Image (cartoon, rainbow, N blue to C red):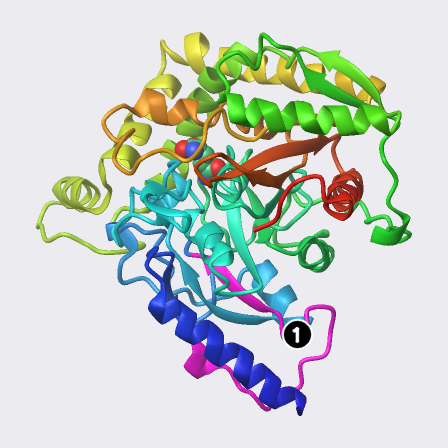
Amino acid sequence: MNPSNSLEQKLLIEKENISNSKTNSVIRSRFEKIDLNKKRNGILENKTFLIKDNIAIKGEPLTCSSNILKSYKSPFNATVIEKIQKEGGIITGQTNCDEFAMGSSSEFSIYGSVKNPFNSDLVAGGSSGGSAAAIAENLADISLGSDTGGSVRQPSAFCGIYGLKPTYGRISRYGLVAHASSFDTIGIMSKDLTDVYKTFSVISGIDKKDATSCNIPLNDKFSFKASKLPKSIGVVNKNILKDVNPEIKDRYYLLIDFLKSKKVEIIEIDLPFFEYCIPAYYVLTMAEASSNLSRFDGVRYGNRSDSNDLSELYVKTRSKGFSDEVKRRIMTGTYVLSSGYYDAYFSKALKVRRLIRNGYSDIFKNCENLLIPTTPDLPFKLENNLKDPLKMYLSDLFTVPINLAGIPSINVPVGYSSNNLPIGLQIVSNSFKEETLFSLAHILNEEEIFEKA
Ligand code: GLN
């Protein structure tokens, strides 16, 4: 078959799959804009990509699933989009997510909830739930999401796919709508580990448009074939696992047994300041979000409500534009930053963050990788956590510490529960050591320890 025919075939199948999908994962496709005759040479030649609706694609809507940006179109490309296209990747559409990437279930969206591809009564996870569900349903080869506190890894676990959260600063954030700038990362999801790596190698690197991007080169000697097991790996003690679903725990211990049988040294660790991670994370991210979202005022961006009075215009626009969860975060964030409360909350949370970071750097003095669950439980029922924000926040228990520390982590699918729901575990490494995540994930995949979908 000639290559452009086979590409055409692939795009037709994916387009058809998107229109038959029942998960509400893809909110917009753009097949009509794809030039089949264009030469696409490069590392990502003819790979299809779906993009979370908080990453800018020139000429396309960029709504962040929010009413306030419903009619906004991006006039520019995010750096990651430019890089993907330069290496032959094809952007086929955009995915549903929680409003401004705030949430853990992809239910806070003007487009409605994303459903889990394995059971439509359950959530797909969030906030990049659309990107994860779409990959599980074979709607594209690769998707991009954003991970501020787990939004790539948690939905990847709930949908049974790989999901990489890179080191903070490894991938340019230019063109990613800011949620909490000192936490935000762009992450990569796929069923195929090689595709995750290829995308990672293409989109990482310094970018003059993002002052927090880093100039630390990837290990050019890395190859999957040369993958080695780490000499030592950190695992968590029973106390930390006490509230974790028993079927997730079983998989965790199975993996530890495998590593032991391969003579990897198992080091039991305590996750640094574990019980303080969720409060510190929410104090800091809400503070940053309240400041980042102040630009959405109806004057510079987005839908504007009518009024002759400027203050009233702001109030009306923002009251109508944001939904409850986003308002809750803006108000809490403003509160923790206000004079009189700044020291009690914001500045204290910053100090806790520093201790957590130091704790993780100490751990990596003794072991190359860490193995921890991605989620405390299996995918939960739609609407179950909507009325209880604290319960929703607790589903990020094992992912937010990684963002507080700024280190990388990958969700690895490790089989299915007795009721056929995906289970995921996280491999974590020190900053800029992503190659070690790929090595270990590759070995686990080759060994076929866990059943595949
Ligand atoms: N669920 C977390 C939150 O609501 C993480 C969100 C994210 O990573 N974008 O903040």
Which residue in the protein does label 1 denote?
Answer: 88
Residue 237: where, in percent of width, then height? 65, 11
Give the residues drawn in magenta, as a range. Answer: 30-52
Is residue 429 visible in the rendered structure shown here?
yes
What residue appears at the point 88 percent right and 40 percent down from the top-left corner?
A: 228
Is residue 42 in the magenta section? Answer: yes
Query: Which is more toward the observer, 80 or 381?
Result: 381
Q: In the figure, 91 relative to 189: above or below?
A: below
Residue 67: where, in percent of width, then height? 24, 51
What residue appears at the point 37 percent right and 36 percent down from the top-left corner?
A: 103
Residue 52: where, in percent of width, then height? 45, 55
Q: In the figure, 327 relative to 451: above or below?
A: above
Predominant SS of the magenta segment: loop
Residue 159: where, in percent of width, then height? 48, 46
Side of 283 where 399 appears, left or right: right
Q: Residue lying furthest front in this view? A: 418
Side of 83 where 274 appears, left or right: left
Q: Residues within 10 Å of mark 1 (few under 14, many from 20)?
A: some
Is residue 223 visible in the rendered structure shown here?
no
Q: In the figure, 112 relative to 43: above or below?
A: above
Can you say which quadrant of the picture contains the N terminus? Answer: bottom right
Is residue 153 in the magenta section? Answer: no
Query: Which is more toward the observer, 184 or 11?
Result: 11
Q: In the figure, 443 relative to 453: above or below?
A: above
Disc 1 element: loop
